[in-house]
Image (spheres, rainbow, N blue to C red):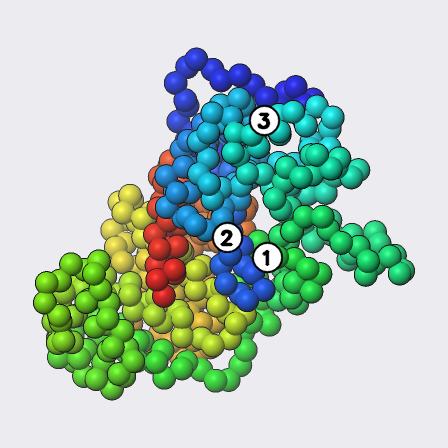
């Protein structure tokens, strides 16, 4: 019943929300293959659920850090409550609302109240009957699973097909391969929620890594070997574009240098091993010219950061291996080179090679956890956390940090 959708705020302190929900995410990729938004979903872990206003309060700092990127906030087992009408959602957040419930006569006033409070709304799914215009106008966009899209399931027939127009811009869920993603854009979708990262069609043969990518791979190998700065400088001098970008980075105002740095060795020393490694990996990920591969950059960076933050909270002593495992997990696609060839050098440690090339070893469950988070497989996330003996709170915090920092990195590339 609609009356069950809206509950009055309790007088008690808000619960520890991040201990009671499982968070998952997916980028929203537009037809140019750019990241046009993000979808963050939360599933409650107990039958009692959580209040949406509490969830919004906890997520607000991350949502603000992601601005101006639009973020769709979807929830399963979270209750709509009057606290949302007091504010709490940043301007870049859109709250998803189930289409079947939106069509119920009792939903009009609660939804209008949210809109008056400045809460932006997105419609999730298709209603069984058309929404009344005053209700429909409260929503900015829709989230449609491709299995519900009547244009491909036969709901529209004959000459009616080309004349059907959606009244709302819509994002498509469920594209499992590149052909389905391209078809969604052909039907007018404004974005694909999630990108088919494992599609074999994206594994094109031939070509191999670009020259700039080869230079970055060599620099990462030298960094791994703790080679002296002189050897790294020699590689940089052979690639003027990378050398220029490095000097541009260290002389940026955010670095706070008082005198201009023109020495490559000085630039290397100033960044330090950890920051230089992250910059090089981000640079490596952007080297592929195939537009269908472009969305994988964000996945790679977020995976690396998520595993890195999880590694900081475990006692396995895995260090940088977790970051490299996540960041390099799509490197074969990004460089058009098999893992077997990529890892012939000493660029990564044996545990990373074991996870990525052989699909086994102690780091593989961490990578599978990241993949489950990307696929909105909340139950699988919980299972992986149990396997790794990681608290749900630790995972949720790590994911939110990774999303905020990952967006900052990809935006600067």
Quarter occupied by residue 123: top right
Please identify the quadrant where the N terminus is shown.
top right
> Which residue in the protein does label 2 denote?
37
As measured in the structure, the alpha-carbon distance from the residue carrying label 1 to the one carrying label 2 is 9 Å
**In the image, 103: left or right of 413?**
right
Q: Dot 3 lies on which element?
A: helix
Disc 3: CA contacts within 10 A as few (<14), some (14-19) or many (>=20): some
Q: Is residue 11 above or below residue 350?
A: above
Query: What residue is shown at x 33% (from left), y 67% (from top)?
Result: 281
Q: Earlier in the sequence, mark 1 or mark 2?
A: 2
Residue 381 to residue 393: above or below: below
Task: Kindly report the distance in space between the C-alpha atoms of the residues bearing marks 3 and 1.
Answer: 28 Å
Q: Which residue is mark 1?
A: 191
Tell me where residue 222 sits by quadrant.
bottom left
Q: Earlier in the sequence, mark 3 or mark 1?
A: 3
- Mark 2 surroundings within 10 Å by alpha-carbon count, few (fewer than 14), some (14 through 19), many (20 or more): many
- Identify the element where label 2 is drawn: strand
Q: Residue 183 location in percent, x, y?
A: 69, 64
The reply to whether discs 1 and 2 touch (Cβ–Cβ < 8 Å) is yes
Q: Position of residue 229 (x, y in %)?
A: 13, 75
Residue 7 placement (x, y as % from top left) = 56, 19
Q: CA distance from mark 2 to mark 3?
A: 25 Å
Residue 395 lies, in percent from the top left, at 39, 42
Please identify the quadrant where the C terminus is shown. bottom left
Q: Which mark is residue 113?
A: 3
Q: Is 199 or 261 nearer to us in this picture?
A: 261
């Amino acid at each position: 019943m609609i009356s069950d959708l809206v509950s009055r705020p309790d007088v008690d302190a808000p619960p520890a929300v991040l201990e009671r929900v499982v968070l998952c995410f997916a980028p929203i990729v537009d037809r140019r293959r750019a990241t046009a938004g993000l979808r963050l979903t939360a599933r409650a872990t107990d039958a009692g659920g959580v209040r949406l206003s509490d969830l919004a309060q906890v997520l607000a700092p991350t949502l603000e850090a992601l601005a101006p990127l639009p973020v769709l906030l979807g929830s399963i087992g979270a209750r709509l409550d009057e606290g949302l009408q007091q504010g709490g959602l940043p301007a870049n957040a859109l709250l998803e609302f189930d289409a079947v419930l939106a069509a119920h006569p009792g939903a009009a006033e609660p939804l209008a109240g949210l809109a008056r409070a400045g809460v932006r709304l997105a419609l999730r799914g298709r209603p069984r009957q058309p929404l009344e215009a005053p209700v429909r106008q409260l929503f900015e966009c829709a989230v449609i699973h491709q299995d519900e899209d009547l244009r491909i399931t036969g709901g529209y027939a004959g000459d009616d097909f080309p004349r059907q127009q959606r009244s709302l811009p819509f994002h498509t869920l469920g594209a499992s391969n590149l052909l389905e993603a391209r078809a969604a854009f052909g039907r007018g979708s404004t974005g694909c929620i999630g990108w088919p990262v494992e599609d074999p069609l994206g594994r094109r043969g031939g070509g191999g890594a670009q020259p700039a990518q080869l230079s970055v791979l060599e620099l990462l190998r030298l960094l791994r070997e703790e080679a002296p700065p002189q050897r790294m400088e020699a590689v940089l001098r052979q690639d003027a574009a990378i050398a220029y970008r490095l000097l541009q980075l260290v002389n940026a105002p955010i670095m706070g240098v008082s005198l201009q740095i023109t020495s490559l060795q000085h630039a290397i020393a100033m960044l330090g091993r950890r920051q230089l490694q992250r910059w090089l990996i981000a640079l490596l990920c952007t080297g592929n010219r195939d537009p269908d591969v472009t969305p994988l950059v964000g996945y790679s960076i977020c995976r690396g950061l998520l595993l890195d933050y999880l590694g900081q909270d475990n006692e396995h002593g895995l260090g940088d291996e977790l970051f490299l495992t996540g960041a390099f997990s799509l490197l074969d696609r990004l460089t058009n080179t098999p893992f077997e060839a990529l890892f012939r050098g000493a660029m990564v440690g044996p545990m990373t090679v074991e996870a990525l090339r052989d699909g086994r070893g102690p780091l593989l469950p961490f990578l599978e956890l990241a993949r489950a988070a990307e696929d909105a497989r909340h139950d699988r996330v919980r299972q992986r956390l149990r396997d790794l003996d990681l608290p749900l709170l630790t995972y949720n915090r790590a994911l939110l940090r990774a999303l905020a920092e990952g967006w900052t990195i990809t935006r600067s590339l």
